Image (cartoon, grey):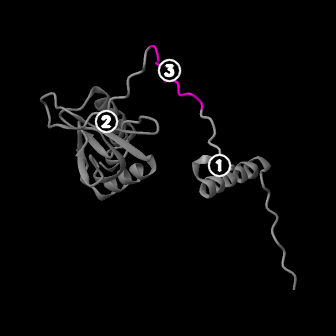
Amino acid sequence: MSTTVPKVKVNPVSAAMLGGLFVSTLAVWLFGDSGIYGVRHAQEPKQAPAVAEAPLPAPVKTAAEITGRASAVDSATVRIAGKDLPIAGLKPVVHAQAQAAFNDFLASAGDIACNRKKSSGKGSDGWSCVTVSDGTDVGEVAIFSGLAFAGGDASQRYLDAEKDAQTRKAGIWGAR
């Protein structure tokens, strides 16, 4: 019985680069930094790094920001890295299907970024959460899908999303 050896395509540029890296590493290992023939190679004079005329400021990341994969505690609270974050402006729908649907959304959304949001006086402090991939407002999705109610401190967008969900009979609104 004959065995066939699979043909492997090798990129000649990659092979040459790896070969060069191997030879360089072997030379340093054998001869130290003095070079292959025992003669130190002249080094390029070091130049001061160029200074940008107007450096861009680094993005500011507040201590209140938490980013990561999220799961649903209920239909108005996410859990990231073991921390429960109630979403500002939401009241949960107390129904296992609402929590399961919200959890499915979070699982498919990828990483979520949440920032602490102070209450304007009508509700309690909470978190504003968006998807990292495209900035989708997690709370708005929950309300628009009929998985959560707009709370006392809800924004006008949340209130409009709730009216739309009621009109379409989405989620909990279809069950009533």
- Residue 141 falls within the magenta-colored stretch: no
Q: Nearer the viewer, residue 10 or 105?
A: 10
114 with respect to 4 (left or right): left
Question: Compared to 102, does 113 lie above or below?
Answer: above
132 with respect to 155 (left or right): right
Residue sitting farthest toward the left: 121
Amino acid type of the residue that numbered disc 1 sits on in the rendered structure: Gly
Quadrant for the N terminus, please.
Answer: bottom right
Q: Nearer the viewer, residue 127 or 44?
A: 44
Q: Secondary structure at mark 1?
A: loop
2 vs 3, front mark: 3
Residue sitting farthest toward the top: 53
Residue at the spot x=75%, y=52% of the render?
15
Residue 44 drawn at (x, y percent): 60, 30
Residue at the spot x=72%, y=53% of the render?
19
Q: Are marks 2 and 1 in contact (CB under 8 Å)?
A: no
Which numbered disc flags the more N-terminal residue, 2 or 1? 1
Which numbered disc flags the more N-terminal residue, 1 or 3? 1
Residue bearing mark 2? 162
Question: Which region is colored magenta?
Answer: 44-53
Amino acid type of the residue that numbered disc 3 sits on in the rendered structure: Ala
Numbered badge on residue 99:
none
Residue 156 drawn at (x, y percent): 28, 26
Amino acid type of the residue that numbered disc 2 sits on in the rendered structure: Glu
Question: Compared to 174, does 46 lie above or below?
Answer: above
Which numbered disc flags the more N-terminal residue, 2 or 3? 3
Residue bearing mark 1? 38
Q: Nearer the viewer, residue 100 or 12?
A: 12
